[in-house]
Image (spheres, rainbow, N blue to C red):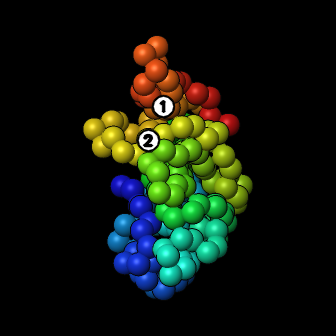
Amino acid sequence: MMQILKPVMTAVLICGAAASGNAQIPEDSIYGDFDGDGKKEHLWMETKYDEDEYATEPFVLRSDNPKLDRKFKVEAPRYVLIMNEGKLNGGTVDYFSITPYGDSTWSMTSVYVFRNGNVHKAIDGFTTWSGNEEEEDFVRPANRPGYAVINEYGMDVEDSWTPQRKTVKLK
């Protein structure tokens, strides 16, 4: 499941959300075991917008699990796509990706994991294009522990942008 923050309608719901006890969890939040304790929690991003629908503050990672709430911020001009990438390393913790973007569908996606109470980057940013809904997910588990397969966009021999599958080591 993914979450794309869009100003106006979503911002009202997300900006009013509280992340403890009886949290108002946005319906487009992602759900998984992000801290590896065997219990699933929600993650979402929130920010404030100006009258032109641009973010006026960094996006803040929110959760209904107080151990994970407000542990990370990311800059983005307008939107953030957050996705649960699953248990990429074959363990108990779900990884998540964050793709900040503005008016373009071209962006840099990074993959993160909670470890020792903090957010750690598991895969450095790679070029993605969110305009091709027929393409597979940006990230998926590889056939060996400690690695993931990403779809990174790059130029092919005919000078057109195409997804290129790459196996990368998780940090």
- Give how far across and how far down residue 170 sits, in percent: 62, 34
Indicate the quadrant where residue 126 lies: top right
Left or right: 164, with 89 as reference point: left
Residues at badges 2 and 1 in contact (C-beta under 8 Å)? Answer: yes
Along the line of sight, the residue nearer the viewer: 91 or 85: 85
- Give how far across and how far down residue 147 sits, in percent: 56, 29
**Residue under pointer 2:** 129
From the viewer's perspective, is residue 20 above or below residue 58?
below
Q: Which residue is painted at 63% across and 54% down in the image?
A: 114
From the viewer's perspective, is residue 74 above or below residue 50?
above
- Give how far across and how far down residue 158 sits, in percent: 42, 16
In the picture, which quadrant includes the C terminus?
top right
Q: Which residue is painted at 70% across and 58% down in the image?
A: 118
Whichever of labels 2 and 1 marks the residue nearer the N terminus, that label is: 2
**Residue under pointer 1:** 153
- Give how far across and how far down residue 33 sits, in percent: 49, 56
At label 2, which amino acid type do we have? Trp
How many numbered marks have been drawn onto this rendered protein structure? 2
Q: Which residue is painted at 34% across and 36% down in the image?
A: 136
From the viewer's perspective, is residue 118 above or below residue 89?
below
